[in-house]
Image (spheres, grey):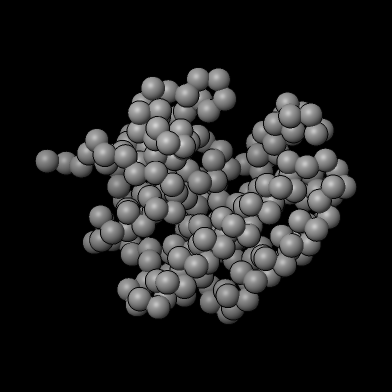
Amino acid sequence: MADEVVLLDYILSTFGIRVRIALAEKGIEYEYKEQDLVNNKSALLLEMNPIYKKIPVLIHNGKPICESLIIVEYIDEVWKDKAPLLPTDPYERAQARFWAKFVDEKVHTIARRMWLGKEGEHEAEKKELIENLKHMADFLGDKPYFGGEKFGFVDIALIPFYKWFYMYEKIGNFKLDCPKIIEWAERCLKNVESVSKFLSDENDVYDLIKMHRKKIGVD
């Protein structure tokens, strides 16, 4: 019996893009169900993720898996026969999990505080964001990808945010001075088909966030 795989997602979600890239890297066929997160969350989303009521949710043979990094690990464990995403060495796996969590806590969270604030309010966040991307650049070192020679877990964690850099700079009125990360991201776009297929358009991201900022009264 073939696996039934459904993804509840939103097209511009960085977290959903992680899952789409992982599924593509593994060659897994799935049904994509776009979710209206603002006006009408679907009954299926509320049933499958009753705690957080958020996307992405992967439904595998009727069973839901939530939270993007957990989903990517699940995909890697269940479909082991193609394109491993996490290292086999326990120490390297631990390091990959550390840096993926770093993306969520020290890149996404810091950037979100910045773009949700009023102009001039979050100078400290801008500096911290650049500093944290430089930490990631140090971890990358001279490797083509965070996992070494092959695109993997940490790359999947960070790459969806690349197309948000333009919005960060425009709204924050600053320059993300992290050339090694830009070079890495462009390498991913050029060499990894799933990345070029699923990454958002930076103008669409900017328009979405500008609209959200107006709605909450900070723009």
Query: Does any portion of residue 32 appear in the rendered image?
Result: no
Give the x, y percent position of residue 86: 38, 66
Q: In this view, does 119 lie to the left or right of 28?
A: right
Q: Residue at x 84, y 47 (%)?
A: 121
Give the x, y percent position of residue 109: 64, 52
Position of residue 11 relative to residue 106, above or below, is above
Q: Nearer the viewer, residue 45 or 31?
A: 45
Q: Residue at x 70, y 36 (%)?
A: 209
Q: On the rendered image, what quadrant is the N terminus found in?
A: top left
Q: How many marks?
A: 0
Q: Residue at x 52, y 50 (%)?
A: 196
Position of residue 32 relative to residue 132, above or below, is above
Give the x, y percent position of residue 152: 43, 64
Corner quadrant of residue 202: top right
Give the x, y percent position of residue 143: 53, 77
Which residue is at the far top? 40
Which residue is at the far left? 1
Query: Does any portion of residue 35 appear in the rendered image?
Result: yes
Q: On the rendered image, what quadrant is the C terminus found in?
A: top right
Q: Which residue is drawn at 73% across and 41% down?
A: 116
Which residue is at the far right? 120
Q: Is residue 68 left or right of residue 166?
A: left
Position of residue 148 relative to residue 34, above or below, is below
